[in-house]
Amino acid sequence: MEIIKVSARSRSTAVAGAIAGVIREQQYAEVQAIGASAVNQSIKAVAIARGYLDEDGIVINCIPFFTEVDIQGLERTAVKLAVWTVPPDSLPEKVQALRAAAAKPPGD
């Protein structure tokens, strides 16, 4: 499995498209980021991907983990986001309410 690596300069919409594509094919994706700005872009990308996938009836879940990576001989701590599909009816009621609210157009 290929890890989707995100930098501070990554476009969140492009990363979201990559996440959505991998999820559609494999039902599981891993996103890795080092540094606060890269983690921010990653989280935004997962949120955007959730919207892309919701249009297809695909619901995702995400859990963050810390991992150590070697970059040019130096160990760095990265945040890895595990993203996978879940059955829509398995979501807690509060999450279902958030999902429904996010699907409404602004002003409704």
Image: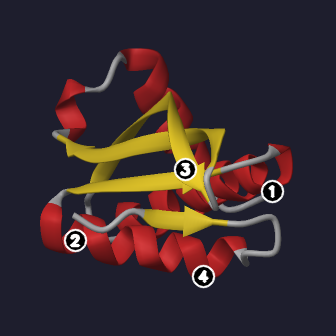
Q: Secondary structure at mark 2?
A: helix
Disc on res. 96 = none
For the residues labelled 3 and 2, say whether their Cβ atoms are less than 8 Å apart: no
At 32% across and 57% down in the image, what residue appears? 29
Other-residue count near label 3 (Cα within 10 Å), few / some / many at <14 / 14–19 / ≥20: few
Tell me what residue is drawn at x 55 percent, y 50 percent. 70
| Percent position of residue 57, x then y | 26, 61
**Alpha-carbon span between mark 4 and mark 2:** 15 Å
Helix, strand or loop status at disc 1: loop
Q: Horizontal and vertical percent for residue 55?
A: 38, 69
Q: Earlier in the sequence, mark 3 or mark 2?
A: 2
What amino acid is labelled 2 in the image? Arg
Mark closest to the chain's N terminus, 2 or 1: 2
Name the residue carrying label 1.
Answer: 107
Residue for badge 3: 70
Residue placed under numbered mark 2 in the picture: 24
Q: Which residue is mark 4?
A: 14
Q: Earlier in the sequence, mark 3 or mark 1?
A: 3
Seen at 32% across and 78% down, the residue is 21
Q: Are marks 3 and 4 in contact (CB under 8 Å)?
A: no
**What amino acid type should be assigned to the residue bearing mark 3?**
Asp
Q: CA distance from mark 3 to mark 2?
A: 30 Å
As measured in the structure, the alpha-carbon distance from the residue carrying label 2 to the one carrying label 1 is 31 Å
For label 3, the SS is: strand
Please state which of residues 61 and 69 is positioned toward the viewer in this rendering.
69
**Outermost residue toward the front in this view:** 73
Q: Looking at the image, is mark 4 or mark 2 earlier in the sequence?
A: 4
Q: Nearer the viewer, mark 3 or mark 4?
A: 3
* Mark 1 vs 4, N-terminal side: 4
Spatial CA distance of label 3 from label 4 is: 25 Å
Task: Answer yes or no: is residue 108 visible.
Answer: no
